[in-house]
Amino acid sequence: MIALLLFAGCATAYVGPGAGFGIVTSFLVFLNAIFVSLLSALIWPVTMLIKLLRRRRREYVRTAKRVVILGLDGLSPDITEKMMADGKMPFLKKLSDEGTFSRLSTTCPGISPVAWSSFQTGVNPGKHGIFDFLAPDRKRYLAKLSSVQTGTAPSAAGLAPFRRTVMRPFVKLLRKSTPFWTLLKRYGIRSTVLRVPITYPPEPLDGHLLSGMCVPDLRGTQGSYTIFTEDEPGHSITGGLWRRLQKLDENRWSAELPGPENTDGEHAAVKLELDTRGETAVLTINEGNLKLEKGLLSDWFEVCFRSGRRKVRGISKFCLTKDSEGKPVLYSTALHVDPYFPSIPISHPVHYSRYLAGLYGPYATMGLAEDTWALNNGAISEETFLKQAWSIYDERKKMFFDALERTADGLIVCVFDTSDRIQHMFWDNGSGEGSPINEMYTTMDSLIGETAEKLGRNDMLIVMSDHGFTSFHTCIDFNRWLLENDYLFLEDGVETVETSFKGVDWSRTKAWSMGLAGIMLNLRGRCGNGIVEPGNDASTLLSEISGKLLKLENSNGERVISSVYLSENVYSGPYVSLGPDLVIGTERGYRSGWSCVTGGIGKEIIYPNDRKWNGDHCHDHRLVPGTLASNVKLNTENTTILDIAPTVLRALGVAAPEYMEGKSLIGEGAHK
Amino acid sequence: MTNAAGILINGFFDILLIPFRTLPHFWGLLFISLLSGLGMIMVFKFVSNQDKILRLRRRMGGEILGILLHLSSPGTVMNFAGKLIWSNTLYLGYLLKPLLVIAIPFMLVWGQLDARYGSAVMDESDPVTVTVFFENGLPLKDSLQIGVSGLELIPPVLFIDTLDEASFRILPLGDSLPNLKIEGVSIQVGRTGSWNGCRIHRGFDSGNSLKRLLTPWIARVDRMPEGPGSGYYSLPDVRYGVLGGYWSWIAVFLLFSSLSAIAGAKFFKVKI
């Protein structure tokens, strides 16, 4: 062979298609790497000059070279304080001893989209317009996502004289006001923002952003898993889809995995084949093979759909188990947008998601990535759910440490959701030794320790959560309560409503509830079939409902509502009217019922929560404050989540804009 | 052994090109180019580790994007450039195995195409210079015996004593296959058949090495003590009219084999 190669003659210049292309492109890559490095070195003085000029705009001397915000969604101060006292969270304890540790008041209500919107803008919900996960469509009495609007709009296509108008899909962020990282751009301060809720679609900034909560899956939902079985389940599946496994022979099955919706309303689908011969089962999709260890969640697997003329790429994980009869049960997570080939914008710049996927492999991109519905419905085991949650944590950690490594100065924000999801699903297990929650808190403490180790002397670390946690053992059906108190009426013959107020008699209804904590009046002029006159009538009605709600008791005579807020008393700003008229604060353990959230009306006002989702924070916001810790001594008097934005700006030498309501927690002085 | 392998390979290509015997040269060349591009990309697919290549390519993509995303930070750019060069080296390492496997069939194809489509056949209006080398020293000028069949020998015969080399010109006559006989050594000159796409000899050699498999344009001759050991003929190169230009067979082969390889890679989802 060597002799042949030596005699290759002309062939040495070209070694065939395939390897030949590889060698040619390798050479180009090598040249490009050198060229771009030189280019970067050449333009560096220019970019530095621009940065210096912009940084001269700063109003203060900065107190930190780099501000690192580690957001741990739902980290409860109750548990944290206890574990710190027990010596189980040594790194947080160290921060507490040397810097700051305090409770952080959350928004009203203490719900992630609301709280994180206030975190990033420094204003109350009346100014950023996010009051809940869902926003009521008051004209049609339907629930819609509060932070994102998707649809189609006319758009010009082609060049003159062939220009024509076509309908193009659009996606719009509904959160108002300005995140503090956008403000930093004016000062030449770069930011890396990772998975902060309510950043989808991504807004431009000086730096990089990867969107978090509310990024949809390929089907356009906030997460719908697929379960494949031979036999149809005897019940409807919330948060998921069922598809039949067609038996091909003793060991082989086929099925269709539904993907994105086409313009004709049908779902594009790919065919999958499951072969259970041998030790490991093999799943075949798009000619690609995935080995499935029975009972174990697979790695990410790429799935490509044809939607019209477009290719839409997604990623999913699979898990194969058996039912009680030994028949296969195949579970597929929601179809996440493939970060390497994103079909919708999930990062700024768009290449940022590709950069991360290239360096660290595929990762979960959907907003609510952990499949809580699948665990709720028993489609996956607790072990599988935990494996999924921790693998998402590992992915996030890699991104976060990448940002820490690459960002020499400026701002880094990263939010980890694992803490929230595990507490939602395992609250009843307690936080004792060996429980998933205990493991989660100690892991988060290690993360804090690893992060602190990577910081320089002039870096500021803020560890924070948007809210705390408590139990959720009982549901309250506010719509049922309104019905039984003659504020809401059903059409004749209707006794219960599954969702979307189907069967409600709006001509007599005065108030309705939608979302996790809100009651709206059926106000004339504002609602589709409004009957309540604005002004005195409305005010009287709200007082009456508030008074009655506060008296609501369980069967033991215990109060279940701790507070009812008039929106005008807790919100201020141009978007107050978008919020509910009353915000209900429930006692620990009580929360708005599952169907009530989307406009359903059940049979009972108070009933047990029978789902695995047994921890929550959608209660009276005073009961679920978040956590704040820092390596810098901060003013901890009456700290609220609105204070974070002004504090970060101040640390980086920037004065908080007047519209921001929070206060800087950094001591005064050092004015330029 | 080498001889038998050579006969097999030559025979294989002769059979492969049967449908193109009466067509212009270009079509046979195009066919082999397309076929070899496709064949080699398939060999590449099955010999290379496609998963590793895909992962590495994506990582390199990430590193390139890393450079672009951090252009204002020369340190980070240098870091990514270094990583990219290292990944590139790894990539070349991944290519080594398919490259070695592909190299042999590739060189065989290269030699066959060179032999069949590289040179023009001898023309009655254009004399060809023949240069022969004598391994055991030049014979005496007057005693050199040159016999021709289907050829006309154009004197004079030049001798270069220092190089043990003799040179003379020949002109083909008619359609018969031309043949030279020098000091008892019978030598086939020019084409080996009367059909398009047959091998065209541009030289001869009495050696018996692996090299012969890669150079089928060299005719094998018997070794005689007094006879010449090797030689070559000055046949003109062929040019092919493609896209308004005059292309060598190499350019035609590279273009069309690459195109078919690209199409094959796309169709068969080969990660390069």
Image (cartoon, coloured by chain):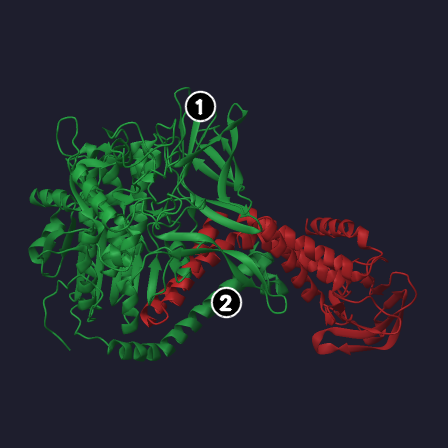
Chain colours: A green, B red
Q: Is residue B102 left or right of residue A572?
A: right
Mark 1 chain: A
Q: Disc 1 or 2, which lies upstream in sequence?
A: 2
In percent of width and height, residue B259 lies at 64, 59
**Is A195 displayed left or right of A317 in the figure?**
left
Residue A305 showing in the rendered view = yes
| Category of crowding for the residue at label 1, using alpha-carbon neighbours closer than 10 angstroms: few (below 14), some (14–19), many (at least 20) | few
Q: Which residue is mark 2?
A: A28
Residue occupied by mark 1 = A327
Instruction: Name the residue type under label 2.
Output: Leu
| A184 to the left or right of A549 | right
Residue A519, how many percent across, how many down? Answer: 26, 43
Position in image of residue A264 (x %, y %): 56, 45
Say which of marks 1 and 2 sits in front.
1
Which of the pair A56/A247 is nearer the observer? A56
- A517 or A6, which lies in front? A517
Confirm whether residue B221 shows in the render.
no
Residue at the spot 92% in from the left edge and 65% down from the top edge: B174
